[in-house]
Amino acid sequence: METLVTHSIMSVWLLCALLSSLICQTEQGEHPLSIKVYAEETDRSENGAWVLNVEWRDGFSEKNELGKVSYDVVVYRTENMTMVHNETIDVTPDNTTHHRWKWTSPIPLQCTSHSVKLRRRDQNHTGEWTPLSLYKGQDLEAIKNILVYPREQIFLVGSTITFCCILKTVPLVNSPFLIPISKRTYISKPRHYDQPSDPYADILCKDNNGKSSRGSSVFIGYPPDDQNLACMTRDLSSVECHWEPGRRTFLENTNKTIYTLNGGVCEFGKCVLRAVPKQVTNWTLIAKNALGVKTLIDTADPTHRVWLRAPSKISHAAYARNVTLQLSWNKENFTSFPMICQAILNGSIYNKSRVGLTSIDLVHLQPFTEYTVKVKCGSNEHFYKWSDESEITFSTKEDIPEAVDVWIQNFKQNTYVLWKPLTPQQSHGIITQYEITKGKRREIIDIGLNTELCHKITPGNERNDQNITVSARNSAGLSPPSTIIVPSYPDNEVEISQISNHTGGFEIVWDEYFNSTCGYVVEWFPTYYETPCAVEWTKIPECDHAACCSWKPSDHGIFKPGLKYTFSVYACIDDKPMLLQRREGYAKEQRPSGTVQKLRSNQNGENLELSWDEVPVKQQNGFILGYKVVTFRSDSKTHDHTELTNGPKVNLTLDPGTYTFNVSAFTSGGDGDNATLRVEVKKKTGQIISTTVIGCSAATVIFIIITVLCFRKRKWLKKLLYPDVPKPKLAGKWNTKDIYCTQMTEGYMKCEIQEVYSSERSATAESQHGLISSNSTVFLAQQCFLNTSKSPVDVSYCPPPWPCAEKLTSIIENPSYNMAFPEPVDGAQISELTLEMQDSYLPAPNFVQKNVVVKDSLGYKPQSA
């Protein structure tokens, strides 16, 4: 019975629990959520808001396994109810059951309205959605102008930004705003900005009516990146904190970084806290701009970080070789502070440490010298950093000069004492006088503008060596005397040798002179100097080597190229010089600047001797190695030959003619200019006569040989040069007979009777006799005589059978043709002629009859009376 009662009670309890659970669930559905939607307070800007805040209260506080309450949240773009975000969030309920959630929009919230709803979710139940909670955008309000968002806003480098345009109508076709998200809002494609800019160019939106919006600009930059915060004290009464800038933000003109140190606002790079704690302290620096925050922390004991300031004033007390610097501080607490100070002077460092240090001594200085010293100080116990440097310039006072460097010179039988000017480090002040003593005689030389450091020694009656001293004076006193002994005898004779050098300098080597007591002196001067005191010298205390000594000038620039120098080496024996060596040479040889002098010639037959004088010594510019002689013929532009010679003359063997000679001297530096001479080489008189006689004799022999050959070959020459010309052939009807006589051997003539027939004769007769038939005979020339008083054609007598004849003493030298035909001769007479042929003929005079033509050896010449 008890068991039954127990079971009944348990059943009733379970039923009550079930009813209670159902009642609770009903009550849960009866408690709606209260939602509030608004933009982030820090982002409530008319230029663009991006963060949407959602707040709600929930009286039911059932938690999940993690002790949190879960809610589903959905965000819409209200007008088109486009869902842009969906998320389940877990929140930790507080005692007031108040919850908050934030959402960042990809576009500014002003672009379009947004609606939010949420519902509660637990392990076994999902609640109902709350009504939509609206956040109004600018597209739901009446607008007068076209709006673009965002504008004038700051973004981090690497951001992607979407712009929107709100307008009454649609935008232009080529506008970047082509994606509609509501009836009045259009957005652009996302733009990525990976480079900083301050600012980027304006972005405009135009509608189809051409109306434009106000430009939208954005600024792209970085958050603060300051580094290396360090805090210290500089005056023992305040703390200064310094830091370094990091990466540039590029927002200097739009959103400067704000600095705070331990809650106090600071300027960039420096923050000052008035109190100086005596223990380890923390300093926190916060740098903030629109894109982020940077926090720097430094921890230290200020007394271990003392960075002193420079002394407020430095004065000095100067002496000839030391100076005392006096330091002044503008803080009283420095008098009990242990410090160390450092003075830097021409590379030398002077350190001094003391509590409340006020002075520093500088020693081992040069007299009459200007110095610039830098002073800096720091903490001596806990050194942290040197202070800033203070600078001061001062001059030391004058001191007596050092001893001068003295030398002597013999020039044109006069003695001069020379000394080198003292450098500023040697003079120790301004030199005003020089004192020269010779025995008991003293001379004062005042320094003028053009004072030469040379003085002529007035000769006395001394026959021994003379002691000469030279001293320099300034405001501090007279320098120690420098002594030199002038020997009573001139320099000992030594052989002068040449220095062959092409490197632009000199090196003098000599054997050590063991009797030397005060070293050596090397003297040099231009060999051909004309004025006194043009001497330089250097003193060598001792040789570097045991057996030989050498000297090389430290500055070869003191020697001019092409100028000859004479070097002398003296041994110093108790302040008296003794000549050891003398040499001459050029630092660098050059080509001669002058020409050979007095170029002349001397002819002996075909041998020609050229001679000349040397180039003037001042124009040689080097050692003359030889001469170059170039020979040109006058009728040729190229030279015949070139000859080199060592001496100032040369012998040449030349053919007769006119020649031009160029003669130049040469050194190792090159050839000099040419000296030119023009010479005509002639033959001897005997040679001319013999040449003339031989030429004339040869011409006479050749003429005789030609004459004999011409006489023996005269017939051949006549036939070759003047052959017989035949009588011309006549045309027409005619029949005539002519007599033609030809000169034969002396006393004989050959005469021919020729009969010329007409062309009308029969062919038979023509073929038998031809056009001309002839008969000839020979007779004595005495058979015909011609009256010399008559014309050559007038016949006075002719033996039968000839009707006439011409006197045989006349000769026709230039026969010519006479085209008149003589009268015919009787044929009976011609037939009686007989022809006698002979093998040889002698010349006979020509004769002519009225109807006779005389034919000589040159041709025919018909004539008529």
Image: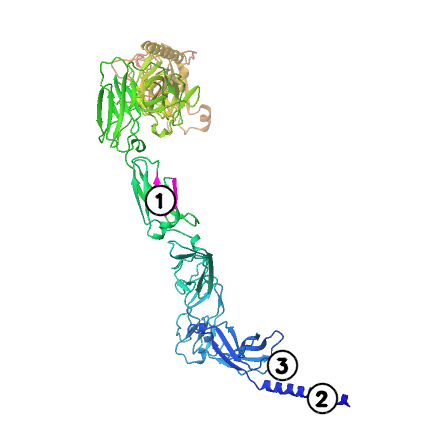
The first of marks 2 and 1 along the sequence is 2
Out of 132 and 685, give the one closest to the viewer.
Answer: 132
- Is residue 361 magenta-colored? yes
How many other residues sit within 10 Å of disc 2, few (<14), some (14-19) or many (≥20)? few
Location of residue 90 by image quarter: bottom right
Q: Which residues are magenta?
A: 347-362
- The residue most toward the right is 1
Q: Name the kind of residue labelled 3 in the image.
A: His
Question: Is residue 204 placed above or below 332 in the rendered structure?
Answer: below
Rendered image: mark on residue 125: 3
Q: CA distance from mark 2 to mark 3?
A: 30 Å
- Residue at 42%, 28% (x, y): give it: 761
Mark 1 — residue?
374
Out of 192 and 437, give the one closest to the viewer.
Answer: 437
Disc 3, SS: loop
Location of residue 5 by image quarter: bottom right
Which quadrant is the C terminus positioned in? top left
- Residue at 60%, 75% (x, y): give it: 67
Q: Name the kind of residue labelled 1 in the image.
A: Lys
Q: Nearer the viewer, mark 2 or mark 1?
A: 2
Mark 2 — residue?
9
Disc 1, SS: strand
Q: Is residue 138 visible?
A: yes
Residue 773 placement (x, y as % from top left): 42, 21
Q: Is residue 287 left or right of residue 363?
A: right
Q: CA distance from mark 2 to mark 1?
A: 106 Å
The first of marks 2 and 3 along the sequence is 2
Q: Nearer the viewer, mark 1 or mark 3?
A: 1
Residue 14 placement (x, y as % from top left): 69, 86
